């Protein structure tokens, strides 16, 4: 199949606009007055550069034409199957008779279709939520999974442990309740767990430039995944004897079954990523060693595996366990002696994982101690509610001050009651001790889950990386590049202990930067801008519908085993829940990396340049090419057009700071 493309040479363009006047798309197919209130024609814009070459042309008055991608995201995202790639020309076309504008409500919602849905904007990985939810509503489950994996290599994992900020911003919440996006994601992803039918994304032709990834948690594996898709040879080095980082060693199996983690990691193996365990970064392997071996870039995703200490009297007594170490031991098959009375200190996911695990190990009186209120807890709401349903007491506004022991083993915790004062640097109200409120709690074991930090002994002298005052690695907030140009980082090593989806997002963005770094192009261009949200919709046009509820094991059954608590939605539940989505934007528009798809507000459908498909099928050139008086627009097979551009404009391609820029696919 050919791959046709347009190229605009600004050295030749004189800004006469003849191409726009002649453009059939612009005049015959779409009403640009309604589609573009700012009156910007998009078909022939080239990215604005305010160099003054054409003073009469306003900034952003010309637009990049549709690139007709070799692997178009818009084709995968369209729930109606209205977008297709022509087998003869490679032209991506939208069928106006099939497109339904993603369920646009005529004259009411269409104005927001050109904008981004809040769910996508507030997903750290910017998944095309609307796209995969509507695909599930159409029972296109395989297509939904493929679309998820455009932005997230771990949809089944995230379907269980993601804190789903997308749902917090769902516009459906203004009618009744947010769409259960995470449950829908889990349903579609779980259909992919059969090894024989598992979806493995296509890997592009091999590129030069080996990349090393340190750490096999969600950040490191995500970085490896996205680099592998681009064709880079990637090696992952892991200190532990198992892969997955906290996914494997830190999250209990009743929340995240280990066979599921292994299944999604296996996909990355099948994409060609080499994975080596029991290799300690900074000791067994250093950046300098790998540089000498030909590696061109590095990603640090070592996470936060070190437990923070309380610095309290008696913390070294037997029976006082660091939270992460405790969970690591359980996930490794150990069964430490806890006794019946266990106190867990903290209010995050690790604390709840620890106390619920202790309960399952036979600690009938396991409880949680937290110095603030439930409102300030950092744990997922699901964790809090499930712990409460399991009958686990939570002692709020309580602070342990010392551990009391006998014969070297902890027997009690001395605590003090707290009250909340003014907000601290985190924005939460700072707890302050209440004078004279001390009391003692008898225990058989204590688990300290106050937080984690990274072990930076791995940074050897040849690394120029710097640490922040918080003990995290210092990186550019957009590119994730460190002070050492070829070293990038992401996940908890950058943010401190956060969520799985944030770690995935960090790995994804770092992979984009590493690709650009190796190719020698700008790391910042086109990134980090504000996102315009679709927020207005006619509430009265939608009927309230109840949100799906996740089926779960009964509390009395689940506290005696590590069987998965949440069993997942049925097919009918998932489809009906997906139908609650308001489709705030258009799935294709939100999937386009070049922002060239427009929404025609009058006809209620999406539209873009189709390179005059009817003309190209009879060996005629697009009309803009025909009418250009200075031959500034070149049309032809992509590989030939690109080579022509390289031959004719190599100097310009090498120096993007000059006044003219060549635009090829």
Image: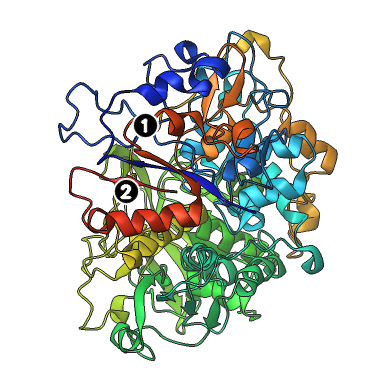
Q: How many labels, in total?
A: 2
Q: Residue at the location (63% across, 10% down)?
A: 106
On the image, the x and y values in percent for residue 312 come to 33, 68
Q: Nearer the viewer, residue 348 or 313?
A: 348
Quadrant holding the N terminus: bottom right
- Camera sees residue 603: yes
Q: Residue at the location (40% across, 33% down)?
A: 531
Q: Secondary structure at mark 2?
A: loop
Q: Residue at the location (72% across, 32% down)?
A: 80
Q: Nearer the viewer, mark 2 or mark 1?
A: 1
Residue 599 is marked as none
Q: Secondary structure at mark 1?
A: loop
On the image, the x and y values in percent for residue 327 come to 56, 71
Instruction: Classify 10 Å Cα crowding around label 2: few (below 14), some (14-19), many (20 and above).
Output: few
Q: Nearer the viewer, residue 631 or 578?
A: 631
Tag 1 residue:
45
Could you give the CA–CA distance between mark 2 and mark 1, rounded to whole angstroms? Answer: 71 Å
Q: Earlier in the sequence, mark 2 or mark 1?
A: 1
Horizontal side of 357 relative to 5 (left or right) equals right
Q: Nearer the viewer, residue 576 or 361?
A: 576
Q: Are marks 2 and 1 in contact (CB under 8 Å)?
A: no
Tag 2 residue:
436
On the image, the x and y values in percent for residue 87 come to 69, 47
Res 439 → quadrant: bottom left
Q: Residue at the location (72% across, 14% down)?
A: 543
Horizontal side of 486 relative to 210 (left or right) equals left
């Amino acid at each position: 199949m050919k791959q046709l493309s347009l190229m605009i040479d600004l050295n030749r363009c004189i800004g006469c606009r003849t191409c726009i006047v002649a453009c059939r798309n612009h005049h015959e197919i779409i009403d640009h007055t309604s589609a573009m209130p700012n009156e910007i024609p998009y078909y022939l814009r080239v990215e604005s550069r305010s160099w003054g070459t054409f003073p009469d042309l306003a900034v952003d008055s010309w637009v990049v034409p549709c690139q007709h991608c070799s692997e178009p995201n818009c084709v995968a995202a369209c729930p109606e199957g209205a977008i297709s790639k022509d087998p003869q020309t490679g032209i991506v076309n939208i069928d106006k008779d099939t497109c339904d504008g993603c369920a646009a409500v005529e004259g009411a919602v269409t104005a927001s279709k050109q904008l981004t849905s809040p769910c996508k904007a507030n997903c750290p990985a910017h998944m095309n939520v609307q796209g995969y939810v509507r695909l599930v509503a159409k029972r296109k489950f395989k297509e939904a999974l493929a679309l998820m994996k455009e932005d997230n290599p771990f949809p089944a994992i995230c379907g269980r442990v993601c804190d789903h900020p997308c749902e917090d911003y769902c516009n459906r919440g203004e009618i009744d309740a947010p769409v259960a996006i995470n449950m829908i994601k889990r349903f579609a992803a779980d259909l992919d767990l059969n090894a024989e039918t598992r979806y493995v994304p296509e890997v592009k032709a091999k590129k030069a430039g080996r990349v090393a990834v340190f750490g096999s948690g969600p950040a490191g594996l995500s970085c490896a995944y996205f680099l592998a898709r681009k064709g880079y040879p990637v090696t992952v080095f892991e200190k532990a004897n198992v892969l997955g980082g906290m996914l494997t060693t830190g999250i209990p199996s009743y929340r995240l079954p280990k066979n599921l983690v292994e299944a999604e990691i296996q996909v990355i193996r099948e994409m060609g990523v080499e994975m080596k365990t029991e290799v300690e970064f900074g000791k067994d392997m250093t950046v300098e060693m790998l540089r000498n071996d030909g590696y061109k870039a590095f990603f640090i995703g070592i996470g936060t595996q070190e437990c923070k200490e309380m610095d309290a009297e008696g913390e070294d007594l037997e029976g006082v366990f660091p939270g992460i170490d405790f969970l690591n031991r359980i996930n490794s098959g150990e069964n430490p002696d806890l006794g019946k009375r266990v106190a867990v200190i903290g209010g995050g996911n690790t604390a709840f994982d620890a106390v619920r695990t202790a309960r399952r190990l036979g600690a009938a009186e396991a409880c949680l101690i937290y110095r603030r209120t439930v409102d300030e807890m950092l744990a997922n709401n699901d964790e809090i509610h499930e712990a409460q349903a399991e009958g686990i007491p939570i002692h709020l506004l309580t602070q342990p001050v010392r551990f009391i022991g006998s014969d070297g083993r902890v027997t009690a915790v001395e605590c003090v009651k707290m009250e909340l004062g003014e907000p601290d640097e985190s924005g939460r109200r700072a707890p302050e001790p209440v004078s004279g409120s001390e009391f003692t709690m008898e225990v058989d074991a204590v688990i300290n889950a106050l937080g984690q930090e990274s072990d930076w002994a791995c940074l050897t002298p040849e690394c120029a990386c710097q640490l922040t005052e918080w003990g995290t690695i210092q990186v550019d907030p957009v590119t994730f590049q460190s002070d050492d140009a070829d070293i990038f980082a992401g996940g908890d090593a950058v943010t401190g202990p956060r969520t799985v989806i944030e770690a995935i997002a960090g790995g994804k963005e770092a992979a984009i930067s590493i690709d650009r770094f190796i190719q020698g192009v700008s790391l910042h261009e086109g990134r980090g801008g504000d996102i315009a949200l679709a927020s207005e919709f006619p509430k009265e046009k939608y009927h309230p519908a109840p949100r799906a509820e996740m089926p779960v094991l009964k509390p009395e059954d689940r506290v005696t085993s590590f069987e998965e608590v949440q069993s997942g939605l049925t097919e009918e539940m998932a489809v009906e829940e997906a139908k609650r989505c308001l489709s705030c934007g258009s799935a294709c528009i939100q999937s386009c990396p070049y922002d060239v798809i427009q929404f025609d507000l009058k006809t209620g459908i999406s539209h873009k340049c189709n390179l005059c498909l009817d003309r190209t099928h009879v060996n005629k050139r697009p009309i803009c090419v025909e009418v250009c008086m200075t031959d500034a627009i070149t049309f032809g097979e992509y590989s030939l057009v690109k080579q022509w551009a390289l031959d004719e404009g190599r100097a310009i391609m090498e120096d993007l700071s000059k006044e003219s820029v060549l635009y090829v696919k």
